[in-house]
Image (cartoon, rainbow, N blue to C red):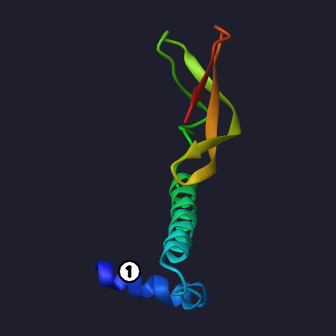
């Protein structure tokens, strides 16, 4: 499986791979940058594929009432791979005035 992944990456990044070879330290840095970029893109896609906390227009609240969907908010978070965007759901407990933020 690892050999297949590496082969696919070489095909996708053929120009970048072709430019490697002059200096090991520079090659190592270039490969690390490619992997960080790949990891960041993959992590963003995983985050984007989630439900963003939305569970319906109204859900039960711990106080016995209900919480109403207010809006989605975007926030930037710093990960191992760099900055990505995370969409969170903001809920408001009806009658209490308490707001909750669900990731």
Residue 71: x %, y % from top left? 71, 34
Q: Residue at x 48, y 87 (%)?
A: 10
Residue beneath disc 1? 5
- Looking at the image, residue 6 sits to the left or right of residue 83; the answer is left
- Looking at the image, residue 22 sits to the left or right of residue 2; the answer is right
Q: Is residue 26 above or below residue 15?
A: above
Image quarter hosting the C terminus? top right
| In-front residue for pair 99/35 | 35
Q: Identify the secondary structure beneath mark 1.
A: helix
Residue 12: x %, y % from top left? 54, 86
Q: Residue at x 49, y 72 (%)?
A: 28
Quadrant in the rendering for residue 58: top right
Residue 67: x %, y % from top left? 59, 22
Number of numbered discs? 1
Would you call the spot at circle 1 few (<14 residues within 10 Å), some (14-19), or many (20 or more)?
Answer: few
Q: Is residue 13 above or below residue 63?
A: below
Q: Is residue 46 above or below residue 31?
A: above
Image quarter hosting the N terminus? bottom left
Q: Residue at x 31, y 84 (%)?
A: 3
| In-front residue for pair 24/77 | 24
Q: Is residue 59 above or below residue 53?
A: above
- Looking at the image, residue 73 sits to the left or right of residue 20; the answer is right
Residue 16: x %, y % from top left? 59, 84
Q: Residue furthest left?
A: 1
Q: Residue at x 64, y 15 (%)?
A: 94
């Amino acid at each position: 499986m690892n050999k297949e992944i590496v082969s696919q990456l070489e095909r996708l990044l053929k120009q970048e791979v072709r430019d490697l070879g002059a200096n090991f330290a520079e090659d190592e840095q270039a490969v690390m940058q490619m992997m960080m970029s790949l990891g960041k893109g993959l992590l963003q896609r995983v985050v984007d594929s989630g439900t963003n906390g939305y569970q319906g227009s109204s859900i039960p609240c711990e106080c016995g009432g209900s919480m109403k969907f207010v809006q989605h908010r975007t926030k930037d978070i710093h990960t191992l791979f760099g900055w990505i965007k995370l969409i969170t759901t903001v809920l408001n407990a009806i009658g209490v005035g308490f707001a909750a933020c669900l990731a």
